[in-house]
Image (cartoon, rainbow, N blue to C red):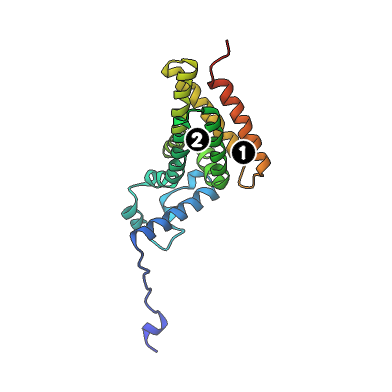
């Protein structure tokens, strides 16, 4: 019997660059969702793929870029919904729709978003991802507070950051199996808080 019959050569699966990136991102999401962010290493990610650690650096500069790529599609969704809110003539109605869209997104991606927000508070790369997800809401909140309440930029930004952080934690509590009733209740609560803070005080 030939040696080659006993130990057939391992055939490498050739992937396109896009396919390799997708596979690494899927593995990264699985690692982040299944454990503590402290375990979210390049080695742990690549152990869930048939590719080598060296291959990781062909497609991503570092772990930070990988995390940014995981949240980039979500940030793009937020930019669109917040953009409509920011440009709307009627901020309450537009804001309610933006909150409802955000609630759907946080429900759909609950496991990933909970991992990003609720693990490794001192991880600088995850902190950057969290900041990227907050940024569009902080921006529109700052704009509304300056125009509606006449606050200076620093005060408006600080209040907007507090409101945005509140949004995140209320929406994260919904979880992946949130009912329509629970989602609408959360949206109504957030709308009430935002309107009471952002709209001009009645004279």
Image location of residue 190, percent across then percent down? 59, 30
Q: Is residue 5 above or below residue 113?
A: below
Mark 2, other Cα within 10 Å: few <14 / some 14–19 / many ≥20: few
Q: Looking at the image, which residue is at 46% across and 28% down?
A: 140
Left or right of 187: which side holds 64? Answer: left
Left or right of 87: which side holds 97? Answer: right
Q: Looking at the image, which residue is at 63% across and 35% down?
A: 186
Image location of residue 182, percent across then percent down? 67, 39
At mark 2, the secondary structure is loop
- In terms of depth relative to the viewer, which is nearer, 84 or 32? 84
Q: Looking at the image, which residue is at 59% across and 25% down?
A: 193
User: To which residue does mark 2 refer?
Assistant: 121
User: To which residue does mark 1 refer?
Assistant: 173
Image location of residue 3, percent across then percent down? 37, 84
Left or right of 177: which side holds 142? Answer: left
Q: CA distance from mark 1 to mark 2?
A: 18 Å
At mark 1, the secondary structure is loop
Image location of residue 175, percent across then percent down? 61, 43
Mark 1, other Cα within 10 Å: few <14 / some 14–19 / many ≥20: some
Q: Is residue 2 above or below residue 32?
A: below
Quadrant in which the N terminus appears: bottom left
Q: Residue furthest top?
A: 203
Residues at discs 1 and 2 in contact (Cβ within 8 Å) = no
């Amino acid at each position: 019997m030939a040696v080659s019959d006993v130990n057939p050569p391992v055939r490498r699966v050739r992937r396109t660059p896009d396919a390799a990136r997708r596979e690494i991102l899927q593995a990264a999401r699985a690692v982040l969702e299944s454990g503590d962010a402290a375990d979210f290493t390049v080695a742990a990610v690549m152990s869930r793929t048939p590719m080598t650690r060296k291959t990781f650096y062909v497609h991503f500069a570092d772990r930070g870029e990988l995390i940014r790529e995981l949240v980039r599609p979500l940030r793009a969704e937020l930019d669109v919904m917040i953009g409509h809110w920011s440009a709307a003539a009627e901020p309450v109605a537009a804001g309610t729709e933006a909150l409802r869209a955000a609630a759907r997104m946080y429900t759909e991606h609950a496991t990933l978003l909970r991992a990003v927000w609720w693990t490794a508070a001192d991880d600088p790369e995850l902190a950057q991802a969290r900041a990227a997800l907050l940024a569009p809401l902080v921006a529109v909140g700052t704009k509304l507070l300056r125009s509606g309440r006449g606050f200076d930029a620093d005060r408006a930004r600080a209040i907007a950051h507090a409101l945005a952080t509140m949004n995140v934690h209320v929406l994260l509590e919904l979880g992946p199996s949130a009912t329509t009733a629970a989602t609408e209740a959360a949206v109504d609560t957030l709308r009430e808080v935002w309107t009471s803070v952002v709209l001009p005080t009645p004279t």
